[in-house]
Image (cartoon, rainbow, N blue to C red):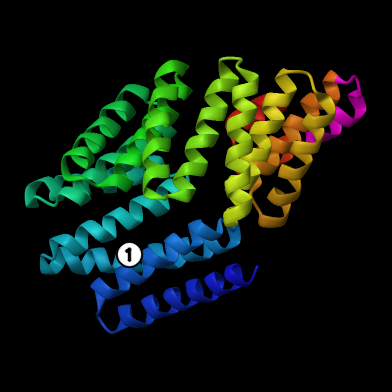
Amino acid sequence: MHDEREKKQQLELCLNTGCSITKNGQFKLAIEKFQEALKLAEELKDEKQIKQSDSKAAQHYQKALEIAIERGYKREEINARFGLGKVHRGNNQIQTARQHYEKTLEIAIERGYKREETNAYRGLGDAYRLSNQIQKAVQHYEKALEIAIERGYKRDETNAYRGLGDTYRLSNQIQKAVQHYEKALEIAIEQGYKRAETNACRGLGNAYRLSNQIPKAVQHCEKALEIAIEQGYKLEETNAYLGLGDAYRLSNQIQKVVQHYEKALEIAIERGYKRDEAKAYCGLGDAYRLNNQIQTASQHYKNALEIAIERGYKRDEAKAY
């Protein structure tokens, strides 16, 4: 809790410093401060903090971008565009995010900036995956992976493998998903990337659940949960509880299902994770319906539906109906 409070104070300091030095024309340093703020917001995974940092960062990334273009500062233009892409992607403005990543990629290739090229390919992979364009997502993640391996960028390699795992899982190519998650997990353990390890374990849990290998699904979700609790990763903890709820539901262990969805719901409400809150309500609705508690199930579905409609979560809205 103490560490979390320190991170919130640090995030606020980064935002304020970024705003202040932007006014003084120090755009390169300002971009670095906003990137640091976004990273801290993601580590905290607090929706209010993320929205605050997104709003401020977007304004100043845009200002920095205009000046970078005007003065021909190519690396600063790349950094500003990449920051804008990340903000727009987080706000579900996928087309705008993609435009920034594409321009970033164009400049990175032209200038020979290999790490920025890798990140642009990965950003495009994320954008195409989120808009369900599977083939394009795979192509871009594979390009990111190719450069990351060639240049020895281990963290980028891990992220590319996980992106491919997520994409193959979404297209129901479970064996390929497992292979890529396992590669991500192997590097994450070897390099000590705890958040990446948590996410790879969770990805494997979801993949095994989809192929009805419930004991393996539970094993990997429990490992993800263990690391998330130990490291204080609240969003990953929430998602691990959801994954365990999903797995136990398939094996008809209703009491365990309810316990895990309720834990996910508790954290989601406390932290403002609205999508996960909707998923937890929906999962509880399924559990109570399977247990023939129709009135309780209906109330949970109703709660999920309200959030999904309010937030525009189309997939969750369909499930709640």
Residue at (52% x, 23% y) in the render = 207
Residue at (12% x, 69% y) in the render = 71
**Which residue type does callout 1 highlight?**
Tyr
Q: Quadrant of the N terminus?
A: bottom right
Residue at (60% x, 17% y) in the render = 213
Which residue position is annotated with label 1?
Answer: 61
Could one spot residue 275 in this view of the protein?
A: no
Q: Quadrant of residue 232?
A: bottom right
On the image, the x and y values in percent for residue 10 come to 49, 75
Disc 1 crowd, CA 10 A, few/some/many (<14, 14-19, 20+): many
Q: Nearer the viewer, residue 174 or 152?
A: 152
Q: Quadrant of the C terminus?
A: top right
Q: Quadrant of residue 313?
A: top right
Q: Nearer the viewer, residue 87 or 116?
A: 116
| SS at circle 1 | helix
Q: Above or below — where is 281 with respect to 17?
A: above
Q: Above or below — where is 193 with respect to 245?
A: below
Tell whether 32 sits left or right of 117. Answer: right
Stretch of the chain drawn in magenta: 291-303
Could one spot residue 9 in this view of the protein?
A: yes
Q: Nearer the viewer, residue 157 or 61?
A: 157
- Is residue 131 found inside the magenta-colored segment of the image? no
Q: Main secondary structure of the magenta part?
A: helix
Tell whether 296 sits left or right of 313. Answer: right
On the image, the x and y values in percent for residue 283 come to 73, 30
Q: Above or below — where is 321 with respect to 40?
A: above
